[in-house]
Image (cartoon, rainbow, N blue to C red):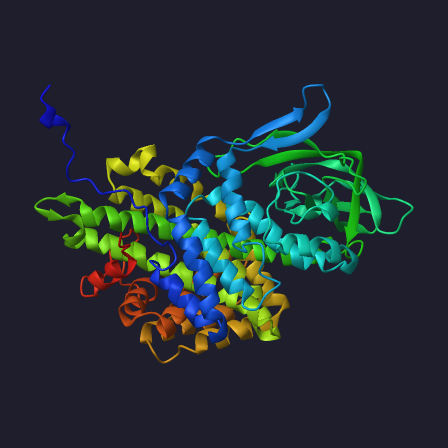
Amino acid sequence: MAASTHTVTNQAPPLTGYDVFTSDRALSEAVERHLAPELLTEAREELELLGRASGSEQVREWGEQANGNPPRLRTHDRYGRRIDEVEFHPAWHRLLGRSVSAGLTDAWGRPGGHVRRAAGFLVASQAEAGHGCPLSMTHAAVPALRAEPELAAVWEPAALSHVYERELRPVAEKPGALLGMAMTEKQGGSDVRANTTEARPLAADGEYVLTGHKWFCSAPMSDAFLVLAQAPAGLTCFLVPRVLADGSRNAFALQRLKDKLGNRSNASAEVEFDGTTWARRVGEEGRGIRTIMGMVAATRLDCVLGSAALMRQAVAQAVHHASYRSAFGGPLVEKPLMRNVLADLALESEAATALGMRLAAAYDAGTQEESALLRISVPAAKYWVTKRCVPVVAEALECLGGNGYVEESGMPRLLRESPLNSVWEGSGNVQALDVVRALRTEPAALDALLREVGEARGADHRLDRAIRGVLVELADLEGIEARARRFAERLALVLQGALLVRWAPPEVADAFCAARLGGDGGAAFGTLPHTLDLRALVERARVEI
């Protein structure tokens, strides 16, 4: 065979060796927008360091290794003793250690912490999304722990630590700790009020033993877990440590690991509490849902950020490929129809990033009005952004053609990951109904959202019309449950449109309002009006290497 047949031409180089943070204009501009000026220099330095690492060939290789070598369950040691441990590939520990050291579990303990952490989470997730679960759970556990100040005094500093230590030991002996969550059960799923796990009080105040089976236990290698169980006064939140204060192992039997579609580097387990599993009550008996909702809301925002990260990485790969690949007489990126597809994908990615970062900033503000905005906007954003992730990633994969369908491209891994955030922490119907619940029970939530979108009124007639449409929907709540998805979608789109009109370049805001609010776009990507500045949208999404 002639040697010339092996000459490789017309292929895009790997997208490595770049700064994931600074190359993402939508993200870096959001950080500039939402952080106080005195915090910007330090935050940028941290995020650029994490961005260069996340875009490096080495860290990308760690992501491939962690995904290609899923965790393994070890129920017993060589002598037959029950140990219930999960073994991970060394690359997993490297990824997790890097992210913990970058402060991705530390949002509650420093100024501007939520914006800084959200940006870092969005950056680090692009190297490998699977290691985001323990980061998210640990970060989100803090507001729940604060319902029990004595517990928070011990566990909060460990959760906020920038030190990752994988060994299971008493928390008092560790420089940092990870926390997980175990709520859902076989018979109930998202309906956690149907939980049957039983909590029996002990003589010491606040101490219980648990009996039950949890169908999904997230991040089972963590140092402790927040769980829900039925106490004498009703459903209650508990902290279940893996190792007790005396150094002995708590009764925490890992029955099996889930064989998941994606998120392969992360472990999700079924866990058994055998009647001797020691737990500490968090909050009041019978108030478990209320206690743990702070954790749930924070993890739902991470679902938004995680989906935004997947979309950004998929779009970056698609634009990169089209910039180097030639077909039909010229670079793909210069072909009008391909440019339309790429611009449409970039638009969706930027809207997701803008919304996720705005909600992170609301956490930092901490005012009653911003908290009310979060109450309705988080479930709406979680509903819509996570649903958009799958079609964005699938279309981006198609931009690479057959190259995108093979594992070596990394696109199949992104595609398998893309449905996850829509399922985790309450699937679509749960989120849409939560939006309706906020409307009915918390009038301040709707007021806060209308004030937020009102900041952009008068700037674009299509946005104004969409806002009026939302108000019309609100005027008639008859049958609102059956149309809850429609309403949640409209809320999210109006909020995204308002944010882009206020802060994005005019060509981005114009395109979004035309295609997403004005009806001048089709059901598939690549159907933007050809009169828009599509080239500018694609250039904004391009990564230079």
Q: Nearer the viewer, residue 32 or 452?
A: 32
Residue occupying the point 53% across, 44% down: 96
Question: Looking at the rendering, which quadrant does residue 410 occupy?
Answer: top left
- Horizontal arrangement in the rendering, residue 229 relative to residue 478 (left or right): right
Q: Nearer the viewer, residue 14 or 229?
A: 14
Q: Is residue 125 above or below residue 79?
A: below
Residue 309 visible at all: yes
Q: Where in the figure is residue 211, as x and y percent of width and height?
A: 78, 36
The single residue placed furthest to the bottom in the displayed view is 458
- Horizontal arrangement in the rendering, residue 99 relative to residue 532 (left or right): right
Q: Is residue 227 above or below residue 37?
A: above
Q: Quadrant of the N terminus?
A: top left
Residue 414 visible at all: no
Q: Where in the figure is residue 466, as x and y percent of width and height?
A: 39, 70
Q: Where in the figure is residue 367, as x and y percent of width and height?
A: 60, 74
Q: Where in the figure is residue 102, as x and y percent of width and height?
A: 51, 54
The single residue placed furthest to the right in the displayed view is 203
Question: Looking at the rendering, which quadrant does residue 128 occupy?
Answer: top left
So how many labels did they put on this image?
Answer: 0
- Horizontal arrangement in the rendering, residue 311 relative to residue 375 (left or right): left
Q: Nearer the viewer, residue 238 or 433?
A: 238
Q: Is residue 207 above or below residue 518?
A: above
Residue occupying the point 61% across, 35% down: 269
